[in-house]
Image (cartoon, grey):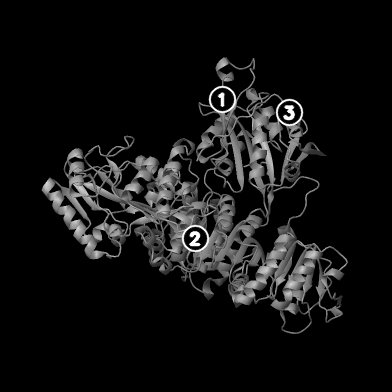
Amino acid sequence: MAKVYDPLQSYLCSNYERSSMNCLFEPRTIALVGATERKFSVGRALFLNMIQQHLEDVVENSHFNYTVYPVNPTRKECFGKKCYDSLLNIPVVIDLVVIVTPAKTVLGIVQEAAKKKVPAILIISSGFKESGPEGIDREKAILDIAKKNGIRILGPNCLGFMNVAYNLNATFINCMACRGTTAFLSQSGALCAAVLDWAVKVRIGFSAFVSVGSMSDIDWGDLVDYLGHDPNTKIILMYIESIGNARKFLSAAKEIAISKPIIVIKAGKSRAAYKAAASHTGSLVGNYDAFISAMKRIGVLVVDTIEELFNCALVLNKMPHPKGPKLLILTNAGGPAVIAADALDISGGELSILPNSIIDRIDQIASPGWSKCNPVDILGDATPQDYVNILKILGDEEVGDGLLIILSPQDITNPTQVAELIIPIINKIKEKIPVICSWMGANEVAMGQEILVKAGIPEISNPDTAAQTFALIWCHAKHLREVYETPHLEDVKTLLPKAKETALSLIESALSRGLLTLGEVESKQILKAYGLPVNETFTCTTEEEAIKVAQKIGYPVVCKLYSRTFTHKSDIGGVFLNIKSDDELREAYKSIKYNAYSAGSYTNQDEVFSGVTIEAMLSGQILELIIGSTTDLQMGPLILFGTGGIYVEIFKDTAIALPPLNDTLAKHLMMRTKIYKAFGCSSKRFPYVSIDELALILTRFSNMVVDLSCYVLECDINPLCISIKNDQHSTNTLFSNNISVLDARFTLRSSILDTSPLVIRPYPKEYIWTYKIPTLSESLSSAENDHTLLIRPIQAADEPKMIEFHKQLSTENIKKQYVPDVSFTDLIAHQRLIAICCADYDRSISLVAISEDECIFGIVRMHKLPARPNRADIRIVVMNKYQSLGIGRFLLTRAVDVAESEGIEVLSAHVLDENTGALKVLRQLGFTMERVDEYYYCQLILTDIRHTNTQITLPGVTLASPHKIM
């Protein structure tokens, strides 16, 4: 695929300023505070690592890209280099300060760095928040100074980092990592040292090697953002203990994972923290479950062991992603192949089926006893030439989605010779599918393993591990595809403007009465407002009132306890089903009242028993599901779906996902449960379930969770019932098969949050406007001229519309808008369009001008620059026949409004000199222009607009007011 100009990868402007992250990882000048010649000290090891490649041979550092200035007030020189007593006395601008002095001295050093306007600091020293209250205060004081002065800090309490491509070793590990394309980030310094030692042995190379320490400032999000845009990095590996700023990390990782694999191992899988949760949902979700759910949502591969981490990296670095789950195995040993097949199946892969044409061809050259199926076992007497001949046959046809070659050392099968002979064949096969070799053994196969590794072919000695690695990579590729599958529902169209207003009224009423839970009645009212089908419920405080209601809706009915005390009513005898008469209802009422008082406290009888609820009894076979939400301390609100009813905690057939959901994400959430296999099947014993209807319910539930995340801690819908008979008790005729919420409960936050706890930003409804095309154009029909356009943020479902939009662009239009020229195929490539349509709204907001018949007339895209979140690149494209109608000007004006709301300080654009229309509008908006070769670098300083209170107006264009959507 040809490269499309992207400011995130290439800064073309002549006045580009290096960011603090650039100064950290690619410093031109470094000050090492604490440099010394004292043996076995961190200061000595660090200084020597930075100025030389071999500890025993001190050399001048002229061949490096940076200069190191030692700082130590007790020394005049260090290894022949002048020592400075203070940062302030260094006569040059310093990009990076590295601190290895005791914790109590660090604050003063940071103050000096601030005075010297240093952009980046690496603090190796320990003794901060990990050491107790005094260390916490010390760290806070340092951060306050750093934030006021725009300084970025890596650490403290870390090992440092290596930028291998830059030849910089800013750690006290005495060996440099081999150069490669893998970045390794770790929260454990000890693990860093061990991994580095092991990687040298197995020839794994790194582009960067970072020990993050306490992450007081620079965190996972910063590092993934920086390395994701680093051309020397192809894969990012992470060892994570705590997530830190989850929203920032997820935002960065979501953008990067589309083009670069991110593989994570997470320490800590305990569920103990959630044992006291107040609902079924809370008790089912542990913090590791939340982490896994978050990683699935953004396309990050999570593994369980260090071995898996590096095996996956090894294969992804050398081979293409598999297009399917089917693995072909070639072996000279049956037992290891069977073990590999078992591991493959358990891990989510499959054995490919060997076609008859292949079997016939192998029959002609293999030993008579070969397996004649996959695994292709050519027996222990296979010669090196047998491997070559059979590999050529297997490579001629696409038999599988991956190939595993197993070799067990035998008298006839020479491991070294086989490795040498098959490399040319593997190089051809790997152009289509990934190939993994497994040379089993130690000394006898060592030379063959070395030959394969040097040739860039992944070699994993254990066949089961190799098969598992293929399956992991396939599952990751499959899931990444699912995450960015184009949804069919439009989020904008499922918004219910009155729903939030209704919900907040009920919540505020409860809070004003000191209640932190909403009962079934109020809960169902909120769900109904959001368009969910509920089985209508009536509250009754007396027996007679309950009987009147039952007679009105018709028997049979369900009678439940109405109480603020009990969450699980059935546990204390608070639910009576299939009541068929007045007498049965009277008995049920009395029993519920007695059971409630027996199980509850008498201090407040009204809370223990406030009456009963009456609702229609669904008849026929019923399927019970659960939909819920809970709040994780790190990942915020989560949505749960699965098998419901009273056995929900026994079966534990549930899956979780992060909101917001669209219909595609909702379906994939359902697919991760066992009960999903029953959907779509209809029988006398089991109701038919519409997957589309359930997806719509989940999407609407997600909209509710998003809207109420500052107010609601947890919500349970249990059960959501689906009946064979359509009893028509549901209040929403959109849903068939009598899908109804039978019971629900909300748990409110004790204090309302000021900011949303969502870690994935929802659709920005606040940026929706209408625009009436103000002038007639002779080239358009009267119907086309009469358009009122909706200006709104782009969404995942817009990908097909974007393809149609690009079809309408002329060659000249494309040439003007894109630097450099790009083909139509590149413009509509799925990978490019998902980067626009599925972008994280914290990083990129694209506004589309869309007609009533769902056609895109124009788009303006604004994307924050990596490592510079206060700056954004902007570009605009308007369909040819709708140019000169003010659409572009309106889009750009609204984009400036969005930028101001998002805290952007500088907007920049790169515009070809022949695109005079765009340049004219940008000038009207106050952009400055600088000519750079054949294009203009345009820039708007938004802080100037804020300070002068400037109101941007456009000649001849009336701006419409934004929609007020709650």
- The image quarter in which residue 514 lies: bottom left
Residue 426 lies, with reference to residue 582, above or below; the image says below
- The image quarter in which residue 953 lies: top right
Q: Nearer the viewer, mark 2 or mark 3?
A: 3
Contact, CB < 8 Å: mark 2 with mark 3? no
Return the residue at label 2.
302
- Residue 191 x %, y %: 58, 73
Could you tell which of marks 1 and 2 lies nearer the N-terminus? 2
Q: Which mark, residue 555?
A: none
Return the residue at label 3.
917
- Residue 838 x %, y %: 54, 44
- Residue 108 x %, y %: 76, 73
For badge 3, the amino acid type reads Gly
Residue lying farthest bottom? 39
Q: Nearer the viewer, mark 1 or mark 2?
A: 1
For residue 538, side relative to residue 433 (left or right): left
For badge 2, the amino acid type reads Val
One can see residue 386 in this view:
no
Return the residue at label 1.
788
- Residue 598 x %, y %: 22, 64
Could you tell which of marks 2 and 3 lies nearer the N-terminus? 2
For residue 201, side relative to residue 603 (left or right): right
Q: Residues within 10 Å of mark 2 (few under 14, many from 20)?
A: many
Q: CA distance from mark 1 to mark 3?
A: 23 Å
For badge 1, the amino acid type reads Thr
Query: Quick one: 618 or 517, which is closer to the camera?
Result: 517
Q: CA distance from mark 1 to mark 2?
A: 47 Å
